[in-house]
Image (cartoon, rainbow, N blue to C red):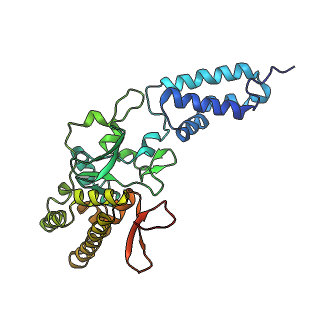
Amino acid sequence: MKPKDPHGAGPAGLRAELVMRLVQERGLDQPGALAVVDADPKLRGLLGRWAAADPEDLAERARRRVDELGRLAGCLGCGTCCRVSSPTLYQPDGELLGQGRLERDALYSLRAGEMVYSARLGRAAPLERDLVKLREAPGGGCVFLRGTTCGNYQARPLQCRHLECWSGRNAGDLEDLARLDRRDLFQDDATALALIEEFDLKVPAAKLTDRLGQAARGEAAAAEQALELMELDHRLRAAITRRYGYGVPELEIMLGRSALAVAESHGLEVVLAPDQRPRLRPKASPGGAI
């Protein structure tokens, strides 16, 4: 008689256990842990022999293999860190841009004063300085993420190269290193530099963030002021494109995200009220403008 299956659910039950074991031991997210389990030749071999093997012995051997992977001093290719967010660029990353190994169209800026989530702090906080980042995919995560692998691995930024989940090395270790500033990317373009300064005076990031934050809390006067700033943001961007020829990707580096995108990050959207005037409302709300 074949030994009793300790899981009852067969190899699927063991596979689920191995995934959760790897999540707990290595700190991977579940999609990443599942990808690692399914890609590992030893685990595939063990799970594939379920019908002909002793389930208890097979399960124990599979657990030992997952423990080995959990202790491995090297990247497992799970993609967990790439799904958290896109990396911030530092001064050494300027070489990647100068060599054409990292395209400018893959970048955007966050302006000092914007409210963003900090993985280090575990909460949202206003930025103290400008940041240049790689774009994020529509569903979240780095734009270069392909399944669980990097589509630009040989030219990945410093922050990506520094991260080591197996050793505890993280972005916080780079805190004292100078970040790349959006002005660095236009240091030879006097027109762009002047436009950056003028735009920041007319649409201050901190003021826009403050009004959107109040609007998200239901304050009608702040919502009106936020809409005025959003309209000005739109008109300035359109005028700069018409007069100077900068495209949307360049503007998202020079001037940061559009005010509409910033509003969306506050959970707000623009809708037309019955009087045909634009209003802000929570994106999750089926009705009722602020």
Q: Quadrant of residue 271?
A: bottom left
Q: Position of residue 141 (x, y in %)?
A: 44, 49
Q: Position of residue 14 (x, y in %)?
A: 68, 29
- In front of the other: 78 or 254: 254
Q: Position of residue 10 (x, y in %)?
A: 75, 31
The image shows residue 167, relative to residue 282, as above or below, that is above
At 70% from the left and 32% from the top, the residue drawn is 13
Q: Quadrant of residue 137?
A: bottom left
At 37% from the left and 45% from the top, the residue drawn is 154
Q: Quadrant of residue 44?
A: top right
- In front of the other: 3 or 233: 233
Quarter placement of the C terminus? bottom left
- In front of the other: 188 or 131: 131
Residue 44 visible in the picture: no
Residue 255 visible in the picture: yes
At 77% from the left and 29% from the top, the residue drawn is 8
Q: Position of residue 94 (x, y in %)?
A: 23, 50
